[in-house]
Amino acid sequence: MQGLTRRQVLAGLAIMPWLLPASVNASVGRARVVVVGGGFAGATAARYLKRQAPALEVVLVEPKSGFYTCPFSNHAVAGLRSVTTLRQDYRALQQQQVVHVRERALEIKLHEQQVVLQGGQHLRYDRLFLAPGIDMDWQAIEGYDQAAAELLPHAWQAGAQTRLLRRQLQAMDDGGLVIISVPDNPYRCPPGPYERASLIAHYLSQAKPRSKVLILDSKDAFSKQALFQQDWLTRHGERIEWVGRAGGGHVVRADAKRRELVCEFGQRQRAAVINLIPPQKAAVIAQRSGLVDASGWVPIRPATFQALHAATVYVAGDACIAAPMPKSAYSANAQAKVAVTALLADLAGLEPPAAAWRNTCYSLLAPGQAVSIAADYAVSAQRLIERPGSLTLSPLQAPAGLRAQEAALGEAWYQSICADTWGSWS
Ligand code: FAD
């Protein structure tokens, strides 16, 4: 972990705003909090609710028995680790007396304070913690639906889609073209597509040296752009080409059977492998709850992460509107902790504490070489802001060893955040 102890890394994951007085645990009594979604935001919330208020009844509604993390899934796409190593499970949460209901939430009845499960049962709640992440916007690109995603994988939810993209890369001939189509903001993990391009190019350089990566982008600028582009040029030369929106990179139609994309200005592109990352929105359950606005995401009160239009519902992670915080696992984990303290204060009839957040995002450029971006966030005039002067980015001219050190820190971050989200207390 190169100079940082595990405790220090864990402490850096989120700025815990407040420690609850012991009396709060007593005063929340046996209220029931239902958490929908057991990903980075939901599992963190369930774990910290139980930690801060053991008497609380915490019910986690999550259909899966195991969760595959998107962080580090680009490593698996490039064959640097197996998909199996991304899997987390809910055993430690269950041991902490979180009740795991393995069902999908179908509907939220806001007035009755109930979650309707796929099996038909109604779960009453005193407070709801909504953390269902994203769904693809299947209406956004003509011809791209769930069936098409089996031929042109998005691999933007980890697991089967990650494996599919990996298999397609392995099966393609040397000399074949790989296209990565990237949506406009906001979407899950702003630097993720460019990390993927770096790592796929690394794989091609080893296994299919005549092949190339073409990035078709629906924007003209992207996260860590100068760092990525500098690295692509020096490491890969012409192996990676990026076409922004002004250059015609915005994809509007897909023909999955022909492996062909049509861009905004009419250009057609065929490829051996197409990784089509479509626009996204808050997951279906959030859409059905009536809590989303016209953007497709859930507006929140930034100081508490309560849904803007339902005071008994807290929303954290990718599903909510927390810009300028990026939609990231780090953000989801940090937001969940702040929302948990606000929720417990609310149950205890106390004022929520002042909150602050941090996000750091590491991107691997090649094995053992990474760059990062980090910033602090706070509430000002009832809006989330990036703290002036807090943004840090890896330097373009890096001293020897820095990229390797950042790769080691990224690895330590991944181990720590998974332990902090799904791990046991001991
Ligand atoms: P999720 O983690 O997706 O969890 C949502 C959960 O809700 C899922 O388990 C789902 O099954 C469940 N759910 C959905 N609907 C229902 C329902 N109706 N009922 C019950 N449960 C439901 N972030 C970083 O910080 N660092 C990184 O390095 C990084 N790398 C990434 C790389 C890639 C390729 C991608 C795609 C993303 C990356 N991210 C990274 C972003 C990160 O994965 C997301 O921001 C994070 O997962 C968001 O957490 P969440 O809890 O909101 O959603």
Image: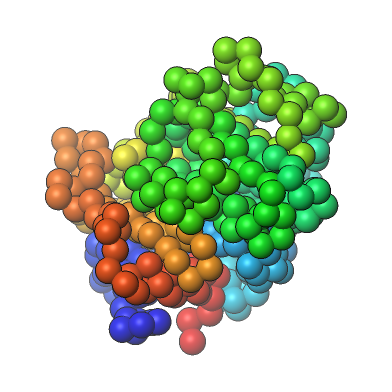
Horizontal side of residue 12 vs 110, given as left or right: left
Residue 304, image x, y percentages: 31, 47
Residue 200, image x, y percentages: 62, 53
Name the residue nearer the viewer: 25 or 208: 208
The tally of labels here is 0
Q: Quadrant of the N terminus?
A: bottom left
Residue occupying the point 41% across, 45% down: 229
Residue occupying the point 34% across, 74% down: 401
When the figure is inspected, residue 165 is found, relative to residue 66, above or below; the finding is above
Residue occupying the point 63% across, 57% down: 205
Answer with the quarter of the image where residue 95 lies: bottom right
Q: Residue furthest top?
A: 265
Residue occupying the point 82% across, 27% down: 258
Residue 359, image x, y percentages: 34, 56
Task: Look at the image and tell me whether residue 164 can be seen.
Answer: no
Answer with the quarter of the image where residue 306 lies: top left
Answer with the quarter of the image where residue 354 lies: bottom left
Horizontal side of residue 351 vs 34, given as left or right: left
Q: Residue furthest bottom?
A: 426
Horizontal side of residue 69 vs 18, given as left or right: right
Residue 220, image x, y percentages: 41, 28
When the figure is inspected, residue 335 is found, relative to residue 89, above or below; the finding is above
Task: Look at the image and tell me whether residue 82 can be seen.
Answer: yes
Name the residue nearer the viewer: 351 or 290: 290
When the figure is inspected, residue 93 is found, relative to residue 254, above or below; the finding is below
